[in-house]
Structures are given as structure tokens and as C-alpha cells.
Image (cartoon, rainbow, N blue to C red):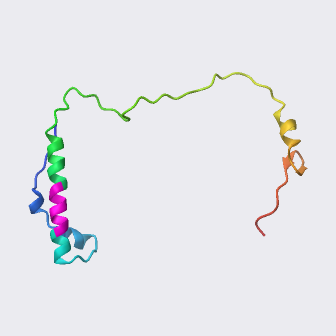
Amino acid sequence: MGIKHTRKATEIDVGYVAGLARLKLSDEEIASFNVQLGQILEYVHKLGEVDVENVEPVAHVAEIFNVLRKDVDTEGDWHDRVMKNAPRTRAGQYMVPRIIE
């Protein structure tokens, strides 16, 4: 299953595509982009020739593991300890300077 191309790079009208994108290109720029586009499409065509029949698709080149901690009960008295570090508190909450008038 390779990549199929229905048009050759020389058949792509770079000037027309530039017009669709509302770009004004000079004749030299159109010629340059046409050459570059042709090189890109030639490379894509080469990639389409690679036999990948027995290659499994992957999302990443290296295995990725999700490291999870055990779901265990922990101490529940953190609030009081955290509030002791606050410079100012009110009603069990940190007080911070107002930033919006």
C-alpha cells in the first residue's frame, strides 16, 4: 500500500495555487517553487516505493509507559500544615494582593 500520485510535479500550477492563497509571486519565485515542489514530490514518491507490508503502525518510535502511583490513602491533615506557611489567611484560605481593580 503505497502513496499514489495522480499528477506530476510539472503539472501543478504554482501560480494558480499562489492565487488561491492570495500570494503575489514573481515568475522567478514560481519557477523556484515549482522546482522545490517537484523535489518534494519525488521524495514522497520514493517513500511510496518502500515495502511496509509487515511493519506495524506505531504512534511513537520508542515505547512510552504511563507511570502511575498506587491509589493509597494518605494523611488528610495537609490543610493546617499548608496554611501555616501562608503570610496572610482568612477563613481558611490564602490572602493574596488584589491585582484587578
Residue beneath the point at 21% across and 26% down: 54
Q: Which residues are magenta?
A: 32-39
Looking at the image, residue 37 sits to the left or right of residue 98; the answer is left
Residue beneath the point at 84% across and 31% down: 77
- 90 or 42, which lies in front? 42
- 36 or 22, which lies in front? 36
Residue 57 position, x and y percent, is 30, 32
Q: Is residue 78 magenta?
A: no
Residue beneath the point at 28% across and 28% down: 56
Residue 20 position, x and y percent, is 24, 70
Visible residue check, residue 3: no
Q: Main secondary structure of the magenta part?
A: helix
Image quadrant containing the N terminus: top left
Residue 69 position, x and y percent, is 62, 25
- The picture quadrant where one finds residue 81 is top right
- The picture quadrant where one finds residue 92 is top right
Q: Is residue 19 above or below residue 5?
A: below
Q: Is residue 56 above or below residue 22?
A: above
Looking at the image, residue 15 sits to the left or right of residue 72; the answer is left
Visible residue check, residue 62: yes
Looking at the image, residue 90 sits to the left or right of residue 16; the answer is right
Residue 80 position, x and y percent, is 87, 37
